[in-house]
Amino acid sequence: MKPVSLTALVYCLDWQSDDLSAYIDPATGEVVSASTMFDDDLTPESAEEAGMIHVPKIEADEEIRSMRRFARGHQDADARDALLDALDGPRPFRRFKDAVYRLGIRDAWFAAQAAGRAESLRDWLTAEKIPFVDDVPLAATAEDPSAADATVPDPAPQLRVLRGGRTPPRSPSGRYINARARNV
């Protein structure tokens, strides 16, 4: 089994949905997508039949806990209060995202989010005995957002959508998105 890129796995968590799942191809170490939406794509059933390894999705409650950790660790009391207030109301994901953008701490949040996801994935990969390359750059934490490494590697070589071998498209912020599922 070839090792998989931890960076590619971290990014794949952004584009997984109910209709699009990520799998590790053990023969190549690549992260591939399987869709229930298109007949010509790899389906979850065919991916599992081919011996590919399903990458678990991040559960909503785990993501909320990650947001709370980030908010509680923020040095600025006003920002901390605004983030925690956003999480306590309706639509916490939308409100938290809006607060992160309004406060100008988007990059710190994305870095802390990626660091938390990488830690969870390391634990999962180790438990499943899946070889991986730990190519995730030093990331900011809630306690020290300035610790982020400015050179984040591009995971595109490890990501591919089996529909023509293309990688997922990027949003204006540079994060990978699933354009087909969003009808873009």
Image: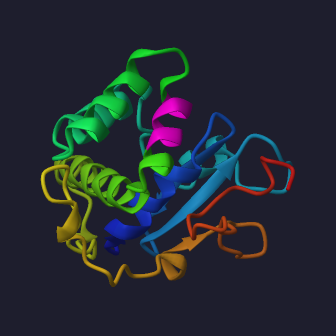
Q: Quadrant of the C terminus?
A: bottom right
Q: Residue at x 23, y 66 (%)?
A: 139
Chief secondary structure of the magenta portion: helix
Q: Is residue 75 left or right of residue 131?
A: left
Left/right of residue 21 with respect to residue 124 in the rendered view? right
User: Where's residue 3, x and y in %?
Assistant: 31, 73
Q: Which one is nearer the viewer's eye here, 160 or 78?
A: 78
Q: Nearer the viewer, residue 94 or 104?
A: 104
Asked if residue 143 is among those painted magenta in the image, a careful observer would answer no
Pick out the residue farthest to the front: 78
Image point 48% across, 25% down: which residue? Answer: 92
Expressed as whole percent of the image width and height from the top left, the position of residue 143 reads 13, 51
Q: How is the image coloured?
A: rainbow
Residue 62 is at least partly visible in this image: no
Range shown magenta: 93-99
Image quadrant holding the N terminus, namely bottom left
Q: Residue at x 25, y 77 (%)?
A: 149
In-image side of 110 versus 35 (left or right): left
Location of residue 40 (image quadrant)? bottom right
Q: Position of residue 174 (x, y in %)?
A: 57, 70
Toward which corner of the image does residue 67 lie, by quadrant? top left
